[in-house]
Image (spheres, rainbow, N blue to C red):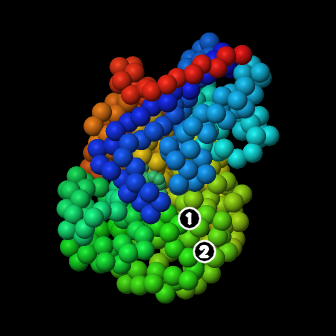
Amino acid sequence: MKIEGIELIRVTMPLRNTFRTSFGTVHERDLLLVRVVTPAAEGWGECVAFGTPMYSSEYVAGAAEVLERFLGPRLLERGEVRAEEVAELLAPVRGHRMAKGALETAVLDAQLRARDESLGDYLGATRNRVPAGVSVGILDSVPELLDVVGGYLAEGYLRIKLKIAPGWDVEPVRAVRERFGDDILLQVDANAAYTLADARHLARLDDFGLLLVEQPLAEEQLRQHAELARLIRTPICLDESIVSAQGAADALALGACRIVNVKPGRVGGYLEARRVHDVCRAHGVAVWCGGMLETGIGRAANVALAGLPGFTVPGDTSGSARYYEHDLTEPFVLRDGHLDLPTGPGIGVTPDAAALAARTVASTWLTA
Ligand code: OSB
Ligand code: MG
């Protein structure tokens, strides 16, 4: 496919609810969309970096710059390119996986639209709907948390994830178990807020039958996660630490985790995300699809990926209404606790022009 132009669109989306994690608080979602124009079709990708580099080292303005100066020009100079060649073409630029992933996704979307194939079919999805979980941020009080969790359960969410941090861990988990019982699927996410010295404290979570504890320690601490796994019974899941399929293989070999959160942006796109899925599946390790507070653009692709057979537990693929009053696309709506895979070509959705225009703060065109 000939890439004629690439548009980088900076967008700000007000969040319905402030989202607080151990690394900071997000009031609105600053994000970057990538639109690729080819003679046959155009394609869209959502870059999952946040406005600030607190979840990981990437951030929106940095992603925009690396796309504009280094990644975009490499593609435009090549002219003809297939989605399956993008990662290799961009490999000389180190890191910046979220920026690369957005560009690869836009090319893949255009390629699939041109041949009228859905992303789910292309990736190998085996289901037409996926179970939905929801990630609940840190709140000011336990009663407030119980209200919020009760509301999500009433909406039909099939799994609850509580964000935790030192000072907000055992008590909220205990309160949710006491109020909603032992049958709800419950897990926690620390976003790297603890150290190995906290092992005895984290072991107190073992009493609550959690599905997993996500990323308790720092991104680089694979060996220490393996050590922690010997000190607590709750299965460890890695998020931030897994940035490639090779890294996932290393983490499994080390015993650093027993389950993996797959976020396509974090690993550089949907093709690498599928390889992470494949590696884990070959090891008998479950994966689930993480989220980055995406708009409908990123959400559509995540839901397609979550249709693959190794995604055996509910992910952070929530309905649009959990995040936004007005999404950029047709909203994703929970039916019976599930989201349907999009069936149209490519990612299956496009931004509503008026909704996008209302939220766009800047846009840049790159041409050959
Ligand atoms: O660690 O999984 C995470 C949101 C922003 C950054 C990191 C994470 C999260 C979530 C929410 O937990 C996922 C979502 O609902 O999109
Ligand atoms: Mg996480």
Q: Which residue is mark 2?
A: 225
- Expressed as whole percent of the image width and height from the top left, the position of residue 105 reads 58, 34
Task: From this view, report whether residue 343 is shown above or below residue 37.
Answer: below
Identity of the residue drawn at 33% across and 43% down: 15
Whether label 2 touches label 1, CB < 8 Å: yes
Q: Which residue is mark 1?
A: 238
Q: Nearer the viewer, residue 51 or 326?
A: 51
Q: Nearer the viewer, residue 300 or 19?
A: 19
Is any atom of residue 181 visible in this view?
no
Task: From this view, report whether residue 24 is shown above or below residue 59.
Answer: below
Res. 325 mark:
none
For ligand 2, tell me if the residue under mark 2 lies within 8 Å. no
Looking at the image, residue 164 sits to the left or right of residue 251; the answer is left
Is any atom of residue 28 visible in this view?
yes
Estimate how packed mark 1 is, as few (under 14), some (14 to 19) or many (20 or more) residues with alpha carbons within 10 Å: many
Q: Nearer the viewer, residue 351 or 120?
A: 351
Identity of the residue drawn at 45% across and 27% down: 361
Amino acid beneath label 2 = His
Of labels 2 and 1, earlier in sequence is 2
Amino acid beneath label 1 = Leu
Which type of secondary structure does the marked residue at label 2 adopt? helix
Ligand 1 quadrant in view: bottom left
- Distance in Å between CA atoms under marks 2 and 1: 9 Å
Which type of secondary structure does the marked residue at label 1 adopt? strand
Q: Nearer the viewer, residue 339 or 88?
A: 88
- Expressed as whole percent of the image width and height from the top left, the position of residue 30 reads 45, 39
